[in-house]
Amino acid sequence: MATISDVARLAGVSTSTVSHVINGTRPVRDETRVRVEEAVRSTGYRRDSLARALRRSRTDSIGLILTDVAEPAFAAMARGVEREAMDAGLTVLLANSGEDAELEARALEVLAERRVDGLLIAPVARSHREAITAVIDQGTPVVLIDRLGEVKADQVGVENTAPMRELVLHMVSHGHRRIALAVGDTNVSTIAERRRGYLEALDEAGLDVDETLIVTGSGRADDTRERMTGVLRRHRPSAVVAASTETAVGVLTAAKGLSLTVPEDFAFATFDGFPHTDLFRPGITAVAQPAHEVGATAMQLLISRIDGSLTSRPRTVRLEPEITYRESCGCPA
C-alpha cells in the first residue's frame, strides 16, 4: 500500500507539502500541486482518515437525527445539511428516531460513542431533553433543527404561528366560519406553534373555538384519516387546514373515502405540502417552508461551533416560509 512518503518521493517534494495539498491546509504553487496530484493518482495513495482524525482529536463526522427522513420537509433539510457538510469535508451519520424518545436516546448514545464532532437533532414529541443536555455538557456542539425548544443550544427553524394565522384568516376572508384544524400531536413544538396560529386567527376574526373541529392524535396519516372522517361526517366544516404533510394526507384520504371533493365540499389548505404541488388538481394552497435552507443554515452554525469561529451564546434562527394560494382554498387558478 502506497504511503505519503511514496507520493512525496515521486513528486519530488516533502511529505508536509503533500499533506498540505491533500488536506488543503496551506496554499501550494499550482505546478507543485499538479505534481502531487499526479503522484497521488500514480501511486494509488489513500490517506488514512482514522489516523488523521486521531491525531487531530476529530472524526470529521457529524450526527443528524431526524424523526422521519421520508417526510418531504425533513428529506430536504437532510439534503441541505449534507451539501454544507460535504463542502466542509465532513461525513454525515444519519439516524431516524421514528418519533420515539427511546430510539432518539439510543441514537444520541451511539453517535456520542462514535465521537462525532457535532450533532444536529429534530427532537421527538416527548424527547428526553436530559439526554440532549448531557451531550452538550460533554462538550459536543449541538444544533436543534426544525423543532425548537428549551435547550441551551443553537436552533434553526421556521416561523410557524404567523403563517398559520394568515392561512386561517384567508379562509375567513372567503366567508368560512366553520374551519377545522387537522393538527396532530401538539407535544411537537412546531405543531403547537401552528395550533397557536389557528387560535389567534379565530380570535382575531371574532370566531368561537369549537374543539370538535380540532383533530389531534399522533399526526400520522392513518390516524388523521380516521379522526377526520368522523369530523367530516358529523360536523361538516366548510374549510379544513392541515398542520403538516402527514395530516394533509389524512384529510384528503378521509375526503376521498366519503366521496367529498375539494374545494366543492370544503376548502382546504396545508402547512408544508407535497413535492411538485403544481401538478395537483385542484392546486393545493400550502405554506412552503425553506427546508433545504433550514438544513444548510443549521449545518453552517454547527461548523462554526466545531471550528471555534462562533463562541457567542446560543443563537435561534427562524426563516420565513412562503404561502402560495391555489384553487383548493377557493382562489382562482
Image (cartoon, rainbow, N blue to C red):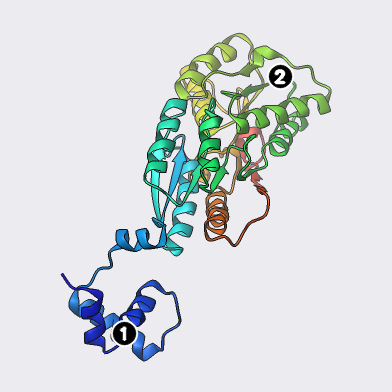
Position above or below: 205 against 7: above
Dot 1 amino acid type: Ser
The quadrant in which the C terminus is found is top right
Residue 20's image quarter?
bottom left
Left or right position of 79 against 189: left
Left or right position of 135 against 45: right
The quadrant in which the N terminus is found is bottom left
Left or right position of 168 against 275: right
Q: Residue at x 54, y 27 (%)?
A: 125
- The mark closer to the camera, 1 or 2, is 1
Residue 137 versus residue 173: which sits nearer the camera? 137
- Residue 261: x and y in percent read 54, 25
User: Which residue is denoted by mark 2 in the rendering?
Assistant: 178
- Within-10-Å neighbours for mark 2: few <14, some 14–19, many 20+: many
**Furthest-top residue in this view:** 234
- Within-10-Å neighbours for mark 1: few <14, some 14–19, many 20+: few
In the structure shown, which secondary structural element does the residue marked by tag 1 occupy? loop
In the structure shown, which secondary structural element does the residue marked by tag 2 occupy? loop
Q: Is residue 100 visible?
A: no
Residue 27's image quarter?
bottom left
User: Which residue is denoted by mark 1 in the rendering?
Assistant: 14
Q: Residue at x 75, y 21 (%)?
A: 177
